[in-house]
Amino acid sequence: MLAIRLIAEPDRLDVLVLPVRSADSTAEGDTSAEPVPTAVAGPDGTAGEATALVSAARLTGRAGEIHTQLRPGRTPGRLLLLGIGDGDEAAWRAAGAALARSASAETHITIALPAEVTPAAVRGLTEGLLLAPYRFRLTEAGDRPALTAVDLLLDDPTGYEDTVATARTTAAMTHLARDLTNTPSSVKTPQWFADQVATAAADLPDLRLRVRGPAELTTEGFGGILAVGGGSASGPRLVELDWHPANARTHVVLIGKGITFDTGGISIKPVASMKLMRKDMAGAAAVVAATVGAAALRLPVRITTLAPLAENMVSGSAFRPGDVIRHYGGTTSETTNSDAEGRLVLADALAYAVQQLKPDLLLDLATLTGANSVALGKRTAALYSENDKLATSVLAAAEAAGESAWRMPLHTDYVEYLGSEIADLYSAPTQGAGSVLAALYLREFTGELRDRWLHLDMSAPSWADGDQAEVSRGATGWGVRSLLRWLADVN
């Protein structure tokens, strides 16, 4: 990962970056720009040169706008003017991401920060710098960014050390979730995923791991996980990761859908819909990475994370459309669509959390429905909860983190569609709105925690078709940043 130093005096000035903000709009609506006074002055002449360039290049100062000026024979050899918009955290994050991509051919850059730069701005810049260059490759071939080091020039570097450390941990955990999600399913069996969790958690005190295999799942009655994983030669697992610091006052359970590959089962998917189904465990990746990050940051909240892991395959032992599944705790589901498998494994985990863990708050993240993208597009998760305070706090954390979610309704008139003639519930009704119905089905397993439960259907934003700001194409690690923000304030 990119090395970032906080310094008060530059010791290397190959490339100097100066911030430019958007100024007041004109009557016609055009925006002008102006250089921002920096905490530490650059070499003689650079401030005046920046002022002249802003006007000559007709810069707007929008976040992520970059203008490069070559200065042969002088120091610095290149001067970069970086648009920071209105200077809030989101604008600095976009600026950092644009800079990391634009300056990828450089080896070292120095960014002169404003005199009154806020910790939030430094966090946004750092996250943008670290997240945008991410690439997942299983081969050494291909170009890699030359940029390896960035210096942040400040008058008081020590005042921002904790901020940069938090941003670095957040980026590292987002990278972990991206790596887990991008890994091909030929490698990513349920046991492989559990092994990666063990490796990530190994050196963190007060972080405990338990992994249940098929025998334990059978003994304890996790029928949904066993049914979905029954068609695969790679048996299912249930990962339980517990972060329990001594000073915790609130206990949160996080649950993430962990389908390591989804063929759709006997209700098989078409090829076009199946080829990216290695991402169907992005919810599990997000909650695991957030928990490891919380432990690394020593957040004062107890977190128990459950990742029900299964591979939904087609074979003679696969569960059938029309089967009745008995979940943990005894509730039964009739399923006529084996491609609606995620809610079956989540139901087991939710019931176990309610009956055995008894947390204060219960959240689940899942790449659950294609209806998520139909309703909200490619970058926004659907949020469901009956708890206004909980929903508001999670939405605020997502906005601060630069991730997008939108609260959706839990229509009571859809509940009748969940009725089955032969079981307690019908898991995959064809009536009504798909994402809403999936949430209503999960709600049936929340018991006494129904008013303290929140569900995020994050199928759409878990994957990006191209680069945009700090998001790189492929797995996005959506949810890690939002969860870490929320968990930091949950007490």
Image (spheres, grey):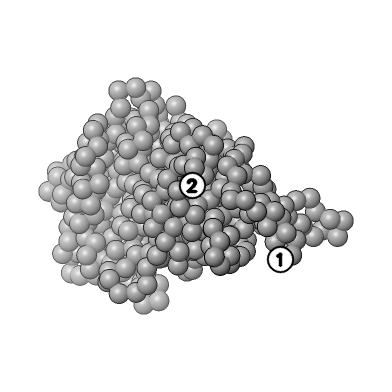
Task: Assess disc 1: are there few (<14), some (14-19) or many (≥20) residues with their C-alpha within 10 Å of its C-alpha.
Answer: few
Amino acid at the residue labelled 2: Pro
Quadrant of the rendered image containing residue 74: bottom right
User: Could you tell me the amino acid type at mark 1?
Assistant: Ala
Residue 126 place in picture, x, y as percent: 48, 48
Query: Image quadrant for the N terminus?
Result: bottom left
x and y percent of residue 234 in the render?
A: 17, 61
- Quarter of the picture containing the C terminus is top left
Q: Nearer the viewer, residue 220 or 202?
A: 202
- The residues bearing labels 2 and 1 have C-alpha atoms spaced at a distance of 27 Å
The vertical placement of 102 against 174, above or below, is below
Left or right of residue 69: residue 169: left
Which label belongs to residue 10? Answer: 2
Q: Which residue is mark 1?
A: 57
**Res 419 label:** none
Q: Position of residue 266 (x, y in %)?
A: 29, 69
User: Does residue 201 appear left or right of residue 393 in this picture?
Assistant: left
* Closer to us: 28 or 224: 28
Question: In the image, what residue occupies the spot 54% across and 65% down?
Answer: 73
Between 106 and 165, the one lying in front of the other is 106
The residue lying at 75 percent from left, 61 percent from top is 55
